[in-house]
Amino acid sequence: MNNHTLANRDLAVLWHPCTQMKDHETLPLIPIKKGQGIWLEDFDGKQYLDAISSWWVNLFGHSNPIINAAIKVQLDSLEHTIFAGFTHEVGIKLAERLVAITPAGLDRCFYADNGSSAVEVALKMSFHYWRNQGQRNKTKFITLENSYHGETLGALAVGHVALYKEIYEPLLMDVITVPGPDCYHRDSGESWADYSRRRFAIMEETLQQQAKSVCAVIIEPLVQCAGNMRMYDPVYLSLLRTACDKYHVHLIVDEIAVGFGRTGTLFACEQAAISPDFMCLSKGLTGGYLPLSAVMTSNSIYQAFYDDYQKLTAFLHSHSYTGNALACSAALATLDIFQQQNIIEKNKPLAAVMAKSAERFIEHPHIAEVRQTGMILAIEMVKNRQTREAFPWQERRGLKVYQHALSKGVLLRPLGNVIYFMPPYIVTEEELWLIADVAWQGIHLATQD
Ligand code: PMP
């Protein structure tokens, strides 16, 4: 068994996510045989440093001994059971722990099985809450430009990245899209905080005018990940919390990508000291092992659904794999690692090394910006640094960086022309320097003509 034979078998029967399959006529598909720590190994024995945490899910490495052991123990007692009418110990324990570690007031946990479905749950719950309160006019959602919340139709509707959304527009519900605080667009010399505050005025005005028809504002806190890792200041979130309260609109915070330490705190919301009405969690929740998501909400929202069955106020949403026991056991082991190894503190020097390793990019003639929030660092590759003119997307310069990095044994997967580092937290200083070196060479090659 080698890469070539497996890739051929794959291409005869499989259809991969987020891929123009024709690309694989020239771009080899890479069959992975095993993962160990930060390294993935293919069937030809070549290794790749997983610098993007396998689509931002992996926190503590592949084949992590602690998570492996927890799943093995769980496997011998219960793999999965229906979660309506039935429950299990790991599901209860995980909910108790999520209630304890998420911001104050998030006292209820509803499980789903992936990020997009958590977003669907939060949207439906918010809408349904207002219905149960007799508020039938609230049917809309406010979202930000450049946001991303998943691929199912509801989640896609509240997202804004044209590449994923545009073609499906005729199928999508109408949403109110507000210009956001993406600090890449701030004036020169303007601070992130000033720009974020300035941009909030548009949100405030929108809320003031439209709150009566709005269920909730949905937002990715601090980093719009799929929207090219664009970042903003926590002050935007504090202002938004205050305004949502003032105008009686829910705040849905999508921490699917940024939760579990990515922004430097366990949850990004902590940096603004806010509690949302709904918090969506997934990806890192299971350490990158198994699909699971959770929507955290308040007891007062929960109570609005709690009544005699005949009143038909219940939230009848379900997924077959809701609260999967193996996934819950992986999540509990992940939370143990955070606690026992003091990960949030241990990540601080790593984030500083990331910053240091990327200093050389700041003056590069084809780099408009190097930005960082905690353990996420992004490099904006452009045609013209002065005017910030972008390379035409058709040239696929990011793909060249991807290909170069692969040849050097590093898995980087640029978003368009934005190269980013989002490694598992077991990354070493040396590995961070390796990632930066390879990105440097890749950018050099990709911007030569
Ligand atoms: N929200 C955000 C912020 C995300 O980054 C993603 C996935 N990249 C999702 C939702 C959707 O999660 P999933 O891919 O598990 O459906």
Image (spheres, rainbow, N blue to C red):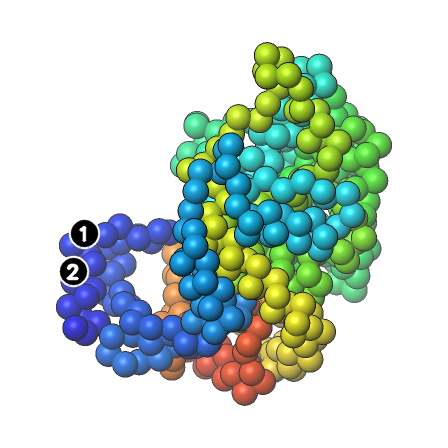
| Image coordinates for residue 441, horizontal then vertical, percent | 45, 81
Numbered label attached to residue 9: 2
Tag 2: residue type? Arg
Q: Position of residue 74 (x, y in %)?
A: 46, 58
The residue lying toward the viewer, choosing from 206 and 246, is 246
State which quarter of the image contains the N terminus: bottom left
45 relative position to 341: left or right? left
**SS under mark 1:** helix
The structure residue drawn at horizontal position 66% and vertical position 49%, both measured from the top left corner, is 96
Residue 1 in view: yes
Residue 255 percent location from the top left of the image: 62, 51
According to the picture, the residue beneath numbered tag 1 turns out to be 13
Q: Report the quarter where the C terminus lies.
A: bottom left
User: What is the distance, in whole Å, between disc 1 and disc 2 at their CAs?
Assistant: 7 Å
Q: Dot 2: what SS?
A: helix
Judge whether 140 appears above or below 285 on screen: above
246 or 205, nearer to the observer: 246
Outermost residue, top side: 310
181 sits left or right of 262 in the view:
right
Identify the residue at horizontal 59%, vertical 39% (top origin): 110
Question: Cβ–Cβ below 8 Å for labels 1 and 2?
Answer: yes
Q: Residue at x 55, y 52 (%)?
A: 90
Q: Quadrant of residue 247?
A: top right
Of 345 and 138, the residue lying toward us? 345
